[in-house]
Image (cartoon, rainbow, N blue to C red):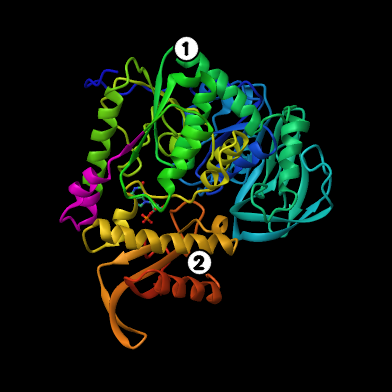
Amino acid sequence: MSATNATVTPAANEASVAVTDEVVVLDYGGQYSQLIARRVRECGVFSELLPHHVGADEVARRKPKGVILSGGPASVYAEGAPPLDRELLELGVPVLGICYGMQLLARELGGRVEGAEVGEFGRSQLTVGETGRLLDGTPREQTCWMSHRDTVFAAPPGFKALASSTASPVAAFESAQRGVYGIQFHPEVIHTPYGQQVLRNFLEGVCGCELGWSARSVMEEQIERIRTQVGDGRAICGLSGGVDSSVAALLVHRAIGDRLTCVFVDHGLMRKDEGEQVVRAFRDHFKVPLVAVDASDRFLTQLKGVSDPEEKRKRIGGEFIRVFEEEAAKLPDVQFLVQGTLYSDVIESGGGTGAATIKSHHNVGGLPEDLQLELVEPLRTLFKDEVRAVGAELGLPERLVWRQPFPGPGLAIRIVGGEATRERLEILREADAILQDEIRKAGLYRELWQSFCVLPDVRTVGVQGDSRTYGNVIVIRAVTSDDAMTADWARLPYDLLEQIASRMISEIRAVGRVVLDITSKPPGTIEWE
Ligand code: XMP
């Protein structure tokens, strides 16, 4: 391996050559756009989300069987509102507009769209006059989810108006002849009970897609792609213990066997037994060549005297890269670097239009950018839940598949207002293990986005037996969330909280008090620093 100052080359396995049928979702800025792509995939059709401005050529390059135009916040009449690219209607594949997408189609094709006095937000009653192809198999009266102010008052000439709602004279229309379809309601949200059926009608009935896409088909397809990309080469993968890098590593191992080496840097800031679980799974169970480095002394030395959170992150990140580079340099002839970049990372950084993405979330687990290696990113087209499905399919232990997100700098940023010493890490690790154990036993682990403990640099007085104590405080933090952008504090049952607190105090001598964080995000953040 050479470690020169060139930049990392983007992955060659772009998402564009779909082996299975694909439907493109164009994003006009709606809050549910990602969800549309996910629902299409749940129907069994591969789907990509692209920004609305990519142009018909870029869409055509993917050879989709259909195109979906998403909702969006703008009024079609607002200045600067994203326009419809007419060429999309000339691609020869069916187009379905949802909400804003429908209004764009209506206006462009000669229908009547107007701003209504009152908008229609939330649950609404849909009355179907004629099912057409789109609403086939759905009842005459049904509920649906609406979120719009502009409304279609008349379908374009030659189109059939299929349904109406209280505030939408035309809530669905179609012209099978032109291959253009529109719905005002959101089929992708669970509050539209027949939404999935409507999507399936479009995908299967209208576009003629085969519903064959699944975690299993992805696996086989990706393994083939990796073989083609890597050829006889050698690859390296940094394992963090999280589900993304684990699944990426296993896929690559299936494809190229022992020509993959994994490097697991144990920075000593992991949760209890986590390092061992990774080593057991990869080295012992999957027989993947694994270099496990116990670098805890090095990281603790770096953290000496540091209490500022950003300084902690910086030092941990820097040391991580040094250790990884040292290990990588010992492996001869490595040309490829495996990364667990997810589709959501790709979307965030430019919408999968070919922009190279290197997962640089925060700072740890972010790898050196000056390794002259080609990226292998087998999860680049997958959402998190799909990665979990692939992980389960590959036989990854349940604990690794369902692991809650864990920050790269680990427990160090949960020792708040003070230095992360070995002793404090030990207290926090033990408290965290009790919390996880009880949460799992209560069957709540998967329901929570994250559950963890924080150890602030505070002592409080207590009494235990007949003597006065002066112990540490443990904070319980548990949140529900979809994406970590917002989070709600989890309403854990009182009995569970009591069990957790009493175990912490009786099993960990240094803990004298347990408190619960009831702050949501915003205004708080999930972590304490
Ligand atoms: P906050 O605290 O900003 O966290 O609400 C949002 C999500 O990011 C995780 N997080 C980190 N992940 N390195 C990471 O890899 C970090 O420095 C870091 N800080 C926060 C946090 O656990 C939550 O999932």
Image quadrant holding the C terminus, namely: bottom left
**Element on which disc 1 rests:** loop
Q: Residue at x 23, y 45 (%)?
A: 297
Residue 442 appears in the rendering: yes
Single out the residue that lies furthest toward the top: 232
Query: Is 425 situated left or right of 199 in this image?
Result: left
Magenta-span inclusion, residue 243: no
- Identify residue for label 2: 490
Q: Decide which of 359, 100 is in the foreground and name it.
A: 359
The residue type indicated by label 2 comes to: Ala
Around disc 1, counting alpha carbons within 10 Å, would you say few (fewer than 14), some (14 to 19), or many (20 or more)?
few
The residue type indicated by label 1 comes to: Gly
Single out the residue that lies furthest toward the front: 466
Percent across and percent down for residue 66 are 66, 29
Q: Decide which of 361, 76 is in the foreground and name it.
A: 361
Pointer 1 or 2: first along the chain: 1
Q: Residue at x 45, y 34 (%)?
A: 340
Q: Decide which of 527, 119 is in the foreground and name it.
A: 527
- The residues colored magenta run 292-312
**Element on which disc 2 rests:** loop
